[in-house]
Image: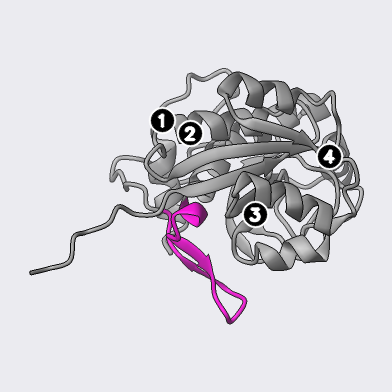
Amino acid sequence: MPAPRTAPRRARIAVLASGGGSNLQALLDHFAGPAAHVGDIVWVGSDRADAGALSRAEKAGAATGVVEHPADGNGLLAQLDRAGADTLVLAGYLKLIPAAVVHAFHGKLLNVHPALLPAFGGSGMYGPRIHAAVLEHGVTITGVTVHFVNEHFDRGPIIAQWPVPVLPGDSVANLAARVLRVEHRLFPLCVAAVASDAIVLGEDGRVHGHLDVPIGVAVPAWRFGLVPDTEAHDDSFPGDVARLFPR
């Protein structure tokens, strides 16, 4: 008689954020909706007690905590252990993750960065500083990078990237808004893929797997991020991702 089939393990996701938490909100919405079968966001932490991300988490019913000593890896691991977290996500978290945490969450620790790494990354490169540097250097394409986290700022293996144009007359504010739209769409897909083991970090240090999203033959590749900021959003983005990043 065959053994009874067991349900897939649900991921227990912890999120660290330093600011208002708009990327956290995108994750909360994704795991309450399309990725509800993958896992749950069980804990949200911040190095700032007044961070808006903590308020968003509380409204969603997730446990929260303040990371009082961000450089204390053992202290952070204790908080994550109490939450039972097996996946750790950085959503606008500005502190360097201690080596002990990086090792404990190897292959299950990821971050989103509002530029096409390795350009415009590293210590001190966050928020408006990145977009100001993009404009100062006169580049014509920026974008979003989702990557695994190692002991260095913004240098872990890349999971996915999406280009965003720099348009004539762009200010830091409107370029940041255009990039953020892409962050909110790409990041949750990648987190769900890592949480479900559809994407893994191999022993060779390379990223393996794929984003499990449909491909629409009528969807023009590169469309998302190139449309005017005022154009209505639609559901074509997952198809675009599959066409550009077929792993």
- Answer whether labels 4 and 3 touch (C-beta < 8 Å): no
**Residue 34 highlighted magenta (yes or no):** no
Given residues 184 and 45, the one toward you in this image is 45
- Residue drawn at point x = 45 percent, y = 60 percent: 197
Cα distance in 3D space between marks 1 and 2: 5 Å
Could you tell me if the residues under marks 3 and 2 are in contact, i.e. CB atoms within 8 Å? no
Tell me the amino acid under the disc marked 2.
His
Q: Position of residue 54 (x, y in %)?
A: 72, 27
Secondary structure, mark 4, is helix
Give the residue type at disc 4.
Answer: Leu
The x and y percentages for residue 15 are 66, 42
Counting the numbered discs, the total is 4
Q: Which residue is mark 4?
A: 135
Q: Which mark is residue 33?
A: 1
Check disc 3 and give the amino acid type.
Answer: Leu
Q: Which residue is mark 2?
A: 30
